[in-house]
Amino acid sequence: MTQQMETKQKKKLGLTTKIFIGLLAGAVVGVILNYLVPGGYVKDTIIVEGVLYVIGQGFIRLMQMLVVPLVFCSLVCGSMSIGDTKKLGSVGVRTLIFYLVTTALAITVALSVGNLIDPGIGLDMASIQTADTVNTSMESTSLVDTLLNIIPTNIFNGLAQGTMLQVILFALIVGIILAKLGDKVDVVSRFFSQFNDIMMEMTMMIMKVAPIGVFCLIARTFANIGFDAFLPMLKYMLAVLLALAIQCFVIYLGLLKIFTGLNPFIFIKNFFPVMAFAFSTATSNATIPMSIDTLAKKMGVSKRISSFTIPLGATINMDGTAIMQGVAVVFVAQAFGIDLTMVDYITVIGTATLASIGTAGVPSVGLITLTMVFNSIGLPVEGIALIMGIDRILDMSRTAVNITGDAVCTTVVAHQNKALNRDIFNASHKKEDIAQ
């Protein structure tokens, strides 16, 4: 009996629970700071932009420190462990097709919801502060450059600068060659496997401070923005959140049910802690180890598959970002009185899909790639200034959707490659039934 109580206490005080507590506590503290604590040097400089900013950004930097070596080693080991290059190609093609199709669907949903809600109609432009600096501070990238930038001219520059598509391409090539050569390169293969273990252990060490980092990030966000800043942009926020909900709970879970036959509610229940962590950090890359671990322990997905698809998805599967871009196109076009044609909408679907592939899994980067989408149909880039103030909350929401899409894709691909243990997936559900 005592052991059962101790076990329950350990479960209650698990890392995911602590992170969720940190998220809620941060929101409460942030609201209190915003509404109840008067502005001044102590609140603004020492607490909000001092302690909360330093600790929160320190945590983000720790996670960013891990991104390149973690993604590189995970993909090398993932592609290497699949072994058969034909099977690796099959897994890779299926993963890419899934990600591209869901991204195109995401933008279509976003444009449809945007036109249904009409977020930009009736907006008082005089009350919104625009910024001309947006045009100079954010650079757009052409389609040709986006494609060519995938191939590194110097892989060490790519690794140093964190150019993720270049890192991914090089890692996949290295992994395929290691798988092909087999025992001839046993020493190199073991090096990558062991270094991957080191990076996973380092990640787990850093994750121990995640609840504190999450608390500071959320507290500072609410302390600066509060709820008043949301009111003028409520229709835009509603459109984005509705499109994200449709993508997550209708499209993703529908695809999961169609291709695997698994219970979508069990999937969401098992994966919810990872979604909560993604929401709090607003970075897909930070969730990579947690996603792989959760998929293995609660979903029954082989790490052979997830160590390949999850790091890949963290870079190229940005459905939540694509949804924000789709709604933003409709919102800004309506706010500035610009009529969009069907050709414009088709152009947005294609451009935003490609833009999302090149989007790094770090906070608010979707605003930068949004310039590419705006330029493709001639929308004023200054319109981005309209949505910058509230993007942090939406960024957190779309990150949770992004990593859910990665997990659904991984589960589907694992099922198709007979690397999914359904007993593990249903285990927690069965335990609840027995308890009841």
Image (cartoon, rainbow, N blue to C red):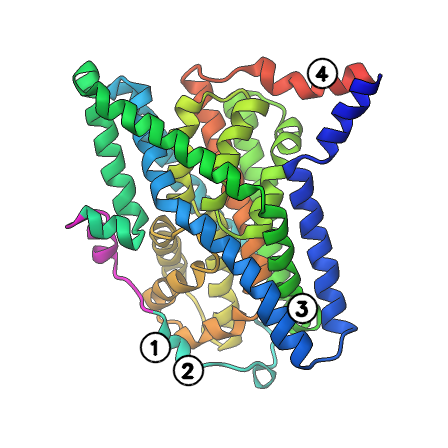
Q: Position of residue 21 (x, y in %)?
A: 71, 47
Mark found first going from the N terminus, 3 or 1: 1
Crowd around label 3: few <14 · some 14–19 · many ≥20 (10 Å): many
**Identity of the residue drawn at 34% across and 63% down:** 372
- Does residue 198 sit above or below 419 in this rendering? below
Three-letter amino acid code at the position of disc 1: Thr
Q: Main secondary structure of the magenta part?
A: loop
Kindly identify which numbered label has been placed on residue 136.
Answer: 1
Crowd around label 1: few <14 · some 14–19 · many ≥20 (10 Å): few
Mark found first going from the N terminus, 2 or 4: 2
Q: CA distance from mark 1 to mark 4?
A: 56 Å
Nearer the observer, 434 or 386: 434
Q: Is residue 193 left or right of residue 421?
A: left
Residue linked to disc 3: 223
Q: Is residue 114 left or right of residue 202?
A: right
Three-letter amino acid code at the position of disc 2: Asp
Whether 112 is among the magenta residues is: no
Three-letter amino acid code at the position of disc 4: Lys
Residue linked to disc 2: 132
Crowd around label 2: few <14 · some 14–19 · many ≥20 (10 Å): few
- Image depth: mark 2 or mark 3 in front: 3
**Identity of the residue drawn at 59% across and 53% down:** 213
Q: Position of residue 52 (x, y in %)?
A: 61, 63
Mark found first going from the N terminus, 2 or 3: 2
Range of the magenta residues? Answer: 139-154
Q: CA distance from mark 3 to mark 1?
A: 29 Å
Quarter of the image where the N terminus is located: top right
Q: Position of residue 403 (x, y in %)?
A: 51, 41
Kindly identify which numbered label has been placed on residue 430.
Answer: 4
Q: Quadrant of residue 118?
A: bottom right
